[in-house]
Amino acid sequence: MSLSVVTLQQHHLQEAARLVLKGYDSQRETVSASPCRCDSLELIETRLRGLLDRFPGAAALRGDKLVGFAQGTAVPSLHGRRSAYVPEWGHAADANPIPIYQAMYDYLAPWWMQEGCRSHVVTLFCRSGDVICEMFHCGFGMVVIDAVRDLSPVEGNVAKIQIREACPGDIGVLLEFEENLTEHLASAPIFRRGGKPPDADEVDRLLRDPGHLYLLACEHRQVLGYMRFGPKEAGSLQPFIDDKSVACTGAYVRSGVRRRGVGAALLAGAFDWARRAGYERCTVDFESANVFARRFWLKHFDPITCSLARHIGETAGPKVNREVSTMGDRP
Ligand SMILES: CC(C)(COP(=O)(O)OP(=O)(O)OC[C@H]1O[C@@H](n2cnc3c(N)ncnc32)[C@H](O)[C@@H]1OP(=O)(O)O)[C@@H](O)C(=O)NCCC(=O)NCCS
């Protein structure tokens, strides 16, 4: 039966949410520490309903059967430009996904351009290797990886140094590390835009909040590095995150003492704290261009989603290759 693509509509949403959860379940088979999906079906449907009619979405059909969908949103400044963003719960396809994604991107890309979105960003479950490869063929590249693991002991080279919780008297060194981290992320080859380190008030607030943890690695009265933990507040996996998940939200080890197991020791200390606090897993997200940090995280965590971006140059287009109706004219 041939494939057709139409505008995503209300009556597609229940089946669309089911397709997302089917994809998530198969992702969970490969990464057992993945967060539980709990009651996400309804949550995903509600989230999709919130995007519908505000931004172009696509439904791929074989006959009357929904075999794929993609629904994104416009983000005013992602990677510094107005972008079309499709989260991992905003797209899915049944068996044989490649022609479905090809047809949906062909359908949506001109609309996205018409909406002024010259950057196209999509988050996918890492299990969808063939779809990720197809997106690379369409000009996308990897930008961010989300990863997860359970709280079992950290393996490999774990430095035997003191790991302790930071206290209000450590604000000075924490501000220094926060600045170092922001500077590192803004530098080559990462070039992250617009990051601002937390100021003294914010660090003080986090230190006093029992839901957050600042850990310090110390040796001979010197502080070698820090890690920051707390709830996962932004980024992918939101509908799947439960209260058993804690996120690593910042990490920095002084450059002269890297590769000695200091990062691993901070993780080990954090997992002891997280187990005592009733957590079952830890998540982290990082820029894939942060090459050494990527090696570090992927030594200890399993990738679960990745975000891919395509930036279309200012000189290209905005000519679209066929007539595109405005949002209001859509069927
Ligand atoms: C990521 C970071 C916290 C790791 O701390 P660390 O104390 O070096 O970590 P460990 O010694 O426990 O682990 C070392 C592993 O990390 C990776 N790594 C870290 N630095 C590396 C480097 N310069 N070259 C190659 N691999 C490196 C490797 O996988 C290495 O394992 P290997 O030595 O067996 O190859 C540290 O590199 C850092 O502060 N980076 C700058 C800030 C940053 O990017 N933070 C993360 C933001 S998401």
Image (cartoon, rainbow, N blue to C red):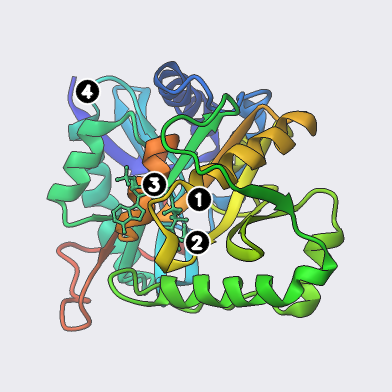
| Observer-nearest of 64 and 229 | 229
With 231 as the anchor, is 107 left or right in this view?
A: left
Labels 4 and 1: the sequence-earlier one: 4
Q: Please tell me whether residue 308 is drawn above or below residue 279 in the rendered image.
A: below
CB of residue at label 3: within 8 Å of ligand 1? yes
Residue bearing mark 3: 296
| Observer-nearest of 299 and 54 | 299
Say which amino acid is labelled 3. Answer: Phe
Q: Which residue corresponds to the image point at 59% horizontal and 47% vertical from the top-left?
A: 161
Of marks 3 and 1, the one in the foreground: 1
Residue bearing mark 4: 96
With 207 as the anchor, is 238 left or right in this view?
A: left
Label 2 and label 1: CA atoms lie apart by 7 Å
Q: Which mark is residue 253?
A: 2
Q: Which residue corresponds to the image point at 54% horizontal and 52% vertical from the top-left?
A: 235
Q: Secondary structure at mark 1?
A: helix
